[in-house]
Amino acid sequence: MAAKTHWFISLWFAISIPIIFWDAGYCFMRPRSMEGGDLHWIWKPYALYQKVDHIYGVKALEEGDGFTNAQSLLNIVENFMNIAYLYLAHVKGTPAASLLGFASAIMTLSKTALYFLQEHYCGYCSIGHNTVHDLIFLWIIPNGFWLLLPTIIIWQFAKDITSALHVAERVSKKEASGKKL
């Protein structure tokens, strides 16, 4: 049985792979990637973002806050899972791709939920200084995509995996009843 693929899932993984590597690069290369750093030209949009989300900024770096790099390391693991999904689904055509994609999407959703919850439980310590407009358009909406799309992907993979399990169960029962005769 070949892997069941969905264009929107493959597109999300393909688009998110370079974004995740770029973001992780910024985090791991701080302070060189930050505004004023010699490599900042690669990450120019972060000049604004490090002011919107202080976990990406100077204060967190100076305080030795490890959350950003810990999340980035998990992002790299997730990214290799996304790459493996695309390979297994579109090159190898194995149904195991769905399970890997499902796991990767759960990882994305979980890490993003943790990111939002960490802000809530610290009293919006890294984003609370923003105006409502900036918070909505520069933090909630962009980060919200990493909640919404993985949720949709998880739902689709869960349907696909459940369907495949039902087929396998029917085949197994049919084979078992054939052996009894």
Image (spheres, rainbow, N blue to C red):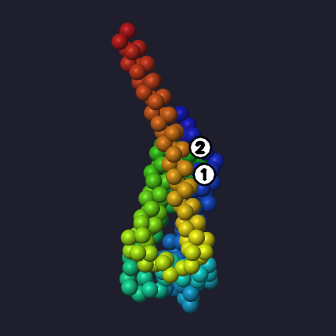
Q: Are marks 1 and 2 in contact (CB under 8 Å)?
A: yes
Marker disc for residue 5? 2
Percent coordinates x, y for residue 21 in the rendering: 54, 68
Residue type indicated by callout 2: Thr
Residue type indicated by callout 1: Ser
In this view, 74 is above or below 160: below
The Cα–Cα distance between marks 1 and 2, rounded to whole angstroms, is: 7 Å
Of residues 137 and 11, the one drawn nearer to the viewer in this rendering? 137
Q: Residue at x 43, y 82 (%)?
A: 60
Q: Choose top left, top right, bottom left or bottom right for residue 139.
A: bottom right
Percent coordinates x, y for residue 62 in the rendering: 41, 87
Percent coordinates x, y for residue 151 in the rendering: 51, 52
Q: Choose top left, top right, bottom left or bottom right for residue 165.
A: top left
Regarding residue 18, the answer to whether it shows in the image is: yes
Which of the two labelled residues, at mark 1 and mark 2, occupies the earlier sequence position?
2
Regarding residue 19, the answer to whether it shows in the image is: no
Report the side of 177 relative to 42 (left or right): left
In this view, 27 is above or below 73: below
Q: For mark 2, give the secondary structure.
A: loop
Residue that carries the numbered disc 1 in the rendered image: 10
Q: Residue at x 35, y 12 (%)?
A: 180
Q: Quadrant for the C terminus, please.
A: top left
Q: For mark 1, give the secondary structure.
A: helix
For this orientation, the residue located farthest to the top is: 181
For this orientation, the residue located farthest to the front is: 132
Percent coordinates x, y for residue 1 in the rendering: 53, 33
